[in-house]
Image (tube, helix red, strand yellow):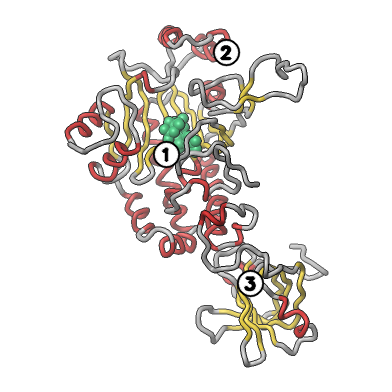
Amino acid sequence: MLGLFGKSITPIKEVLEAKPLNKMVTVAGWVRTRRDSKAGVSFVELSDGSHIRPLQLVIPITLENSGRDLPRLHPGTSLLATGLLIPSIGKGQELELQVEEFGILGPSDPESYPIQKKRHSFEFLRSYPHLRPRTNTFGSVFRMRSRLFFQIHRFFQERGFYYISTPIITQSDCEGAGELFRVKGQSESGEEFFGRPTYLTVSGQLELEAFALSLGKVYTFGPTFRAENSFTTRHLSEFWMVEPEVAFLDLYGLIGLAEEFMRHLLSTTLIESREELEFFDRWVSAGLIKGLEESINKEFVIMPYEEVIRVLCESKEPFQYPVHWGVDLKTEHERYLTERYVKGPVFVIDYPKEIKPFYMKLNPDGKTVRAMDLLLPRWGEIIGGSQREEELRTLMERMEELKMDMDRYWWYLDLRRYGSAPHSGFGLGFERLLLYLTGLNNIRDVIPYPRTPNTIVV
Ligand code: ATP
Ligand code: MN
């Protein structure tokens, strides 16, 4: 690949993995630490973000510019260095670069550079979303995030799904009122830019259903927006959602798909992000790897909502929110169910229709819908999905009950008029998946630039 000043630069990942011993290598990155020894050399830990481990540089004080530049190698300084790669006799690393030539690309003021200590609190680092990816923790989060993106596309593409770019600006308020961001132009007259109210999408599902009912197996994966005032560690105002939608698939087929999907992501992450997981296991969440490995082989339990309510009622737990048929499950209920009762992931199905959106398929009992939520120990809901109502009459009745504006959904109803078919889909919150896989606690720490009510740093 191209480099700088006619030199080709080798990513540190490649140096550490391919180990081109006794070869001249040029690397570029940012100084983590510098230690001056009495033996006439300085040891510099250089990181370029390509790998969790830094490369140790050994820079002799005898180089032409050492006198001037060595003292300036403060944390955060960017550096280009060329030297011979040799086995390291020092502790802590296998290799080191015997530097023969180096140059500072950009200095870093040691007085003001915020990322000084080896370990800052996550909260402190949230004030520096533009600098935190230079730390081990956040470098690891975002390398994992990127690999997961690719694995998600791979999972669906290998199974014959087509990727559909559903719109960001929409007219439909899929999940009900109160959670929408309005989209307006800059018009001074106050007129609607599109001639009618528009919003940022809360889910690509409705638009995706049309493509499931024409291409068969489809998915979308994009940013999603919710103007909900949820100050929790699991909610963002802007997050990413993966949504498969499949024609000729019922609720049980959908649960099978979700299970296979979770297993694929778990097993590929355990292989390709091993070093990052070891880091999190050691510093963030003890027992993380063991827990993930066990989840791969665990049966996912399926429980109807009615049974969940019975279990919760019989538990004699002093829940803050009382339990009875019809309530939406709160965090405390989900945690009791997954951590104490099932002791693992659980699909809850057949929820009361009142607490679910209009498009879910009505069960023959007339009270519950063919919904499924996947709940995980510690993190709660990670997937929400359902079989969709494919019968025109039933769907229209439900929309009337909810006093919805039918005219706005004419196209959605068309899908039930012309060749309607059973179909199902779910939405997985990508950042919640990352919490589960990294063991981190706060959803603000797994998205590059978090947006939450009243907070937007960069
Ligand atoms: P919750 O009850 O946790 O608010 P929800 O029922 O609103 O979730 P859905 O509308 O079913 O969630 O969305 C599908 C998935 O998207 C959820 O299972 C979750 O993983 C994720 N999700 C929903 N809202 C948010 C949010 N505000 N921030 C991050 N992820 C979210
Ligand atoms: Mn919600």
At 45% from the left and 28% from the top, the residue drawn is 425
**How far is the residue under mark 2 from the one under mark 3?**
57 Å
> Viewed as shown, does residue 80 lie left or right of 44?
right
Mark 1 nearby-residue class (10 Å; few <14, some 14–19, many ≥20): some
> Mark 1 and 2 residues: CB-CB less than 8 Å, in contact?
no
* Above-or-below relation of 302 to 141: above
Q: Amino acid at mark 2?
A: Trp
Dot 3 falls on a residue whose secondary structure is strand
* Above-or-below relation of 348 to 264: above
Q: Position of residue 395 (x, y in %)?
A: 44, 11
**How far is the residue under mark 1 from the one under mark 2?**
30 Å
Q: Which residue is mark 3?
A: 46
Q: Which mark is residue 411?
A: 2
* Residue 427 appears in the rendering: no
Q: Is mark 1 within 8 Å of ligand 1?
A: yes
Which of the two marks, 2 or 3, is nearer to us in this view? 3
At 33% from the left and 35% from the top, the residue drawn is 347
Q: Amino acid at mark 1?
A: Ile
Q: Earlier in the sequence, mark 1 or mark 2?
A: 1
Q: Earlier in the sequence, mark 1 or mark 3?
A: 3
Mark 2 nearby-residue class (10 Å; few <14, some 14–19, many ≥20): some
Q: Quadrant of residue 410?
A: top right
Q: Position of residue 332 (x, y in %)?
A: 31, 39
Q: Earlier in the sequence, mark 2 or mark 3?
A: 3
Q: Which mark is residue 382?
A: 1
Q: How many marks?
A: 3
Which of the two marks, 1 or 2, is nearer to us in this view? 1
